[in-house]
């Protein structure tokens, strides 16, 4: 688990705080979970890169996913009626509790699998019309040079999740490094917790 500090890569240590606007990434066998005040959390799997709260003026803008596989649980509350996740090709928003997996490759092709709840997906580069609503157990592909299709891939979540679970288990299996857990401190920092899961 690594973050940028003064434009230099630094390894994250247990108990270390991660400020807003920090870029965080994992190596090939990396995994980390970040718990945020209010019940939201996100998990990074191998070869993933995110920026925590790049837009500081809006508390509901939780995460910018730059690459890899990330699981996000959005938990909007009365102070944040909507929470959003940004990628290079789409803006994902939820007004109620929702959990989703995001897979973003280097070519700007993204897959969103909704595990629970529902999210709205708007193309970031070609924003035309209303966002597409994706409900639990449904998935959608977003490509940078094509409008979002209204066609939703129903039931594919189980196939995608099985692959993701195998990836996670191989990354944190016996003989591999421990996991890092993070908890938000003071609204603008995350605190690392080295408890094994």
Image (tube, grey):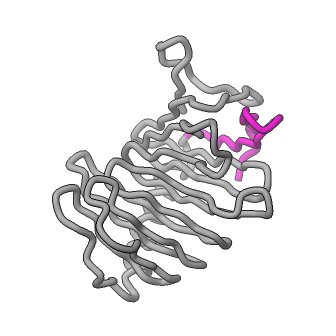
Quadrant including the N terminus: top right
Residue found at the very far right of the displayed protein: 186
- Above or below, 165 relative to 28: below
The reply, left or right, for residue 99 in relation to residue 78 is left
Where is residue 33 drawn, in percent x and y? 63, 48
Residue found at the very far front of the displayed protein: 129
- Above or below, 166 relative to 159: above
- Pick the front one: 19 or 79: 79
Q: Is residue 178 magenta?
A: yes
- Pick the front one: 121 or 163: 121
Q: Is residue 165 magenta?
A: no
Q: How many marks can you see?
A: 0
- Above or below, 94 relative to 68: below
**Residue 140: quarter of image:** bottom left
Residue at coordinates 33% horizontally, 61% vertically from top-left? 123
Where is residue 12 drawn, in percent x and y? 62, 26
Magenta span covers which residues? 177-197
- Pick the front one: 82 or 104: 82
Residue at coordinates 29% horizontally, 67% vertically from top-left? 128
Where is residue 195 drawn, in percent x and y? 76, 43
Residue at coordinates 83% horizontally, 35% vertically from top-left? 186
- Pick the front one: 68 or 162: 68
Residue found at the very far left of the displayed protein: 145
Where is residue 87 drawn, in percent x and y? 40, 50
């Amino acid at each position: 688990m690594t973050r940028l500090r003064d434009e230099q890569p630094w390894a994250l240590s247990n108990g270390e705080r991660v400020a807003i606007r920090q870029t965080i990434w994992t190596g090939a066998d990396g995994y980390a979970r970040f718990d945020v005040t209010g019940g939201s959390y996100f998990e990074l799997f191998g070869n993933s890169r995110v920026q925590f709260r790049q837009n500081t003026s809006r508390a509901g803008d939780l995460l910018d996913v730059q690459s890899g596989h990330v699981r996000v649980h959005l938990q909007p509350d009365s102070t944040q009626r909507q929470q959003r996740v940004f990628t290079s090709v789409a803006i994902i928003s939820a007004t109620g509790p929702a959990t989703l997996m995001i897979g973003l490759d280097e070519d700007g092709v993204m897959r969103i699998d909704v595990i629970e709840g529902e999210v709205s997906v708007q193309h970031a580069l070609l924003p035309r019309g209303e966002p597409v609503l994706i409900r639990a157990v449904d998935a959608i592909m977003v490509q940078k040079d094509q409008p979002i299709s209204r066609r939703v891939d129903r039931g594919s979540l189980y196939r995608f999740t099985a692959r993701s679970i195998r990836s996670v288990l191989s990354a944190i299996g016996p003989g591999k490094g421990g996991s890092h857990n993070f908890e938000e401190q003071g609204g603008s920092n995350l605190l690392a917790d080295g408890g094994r899961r």
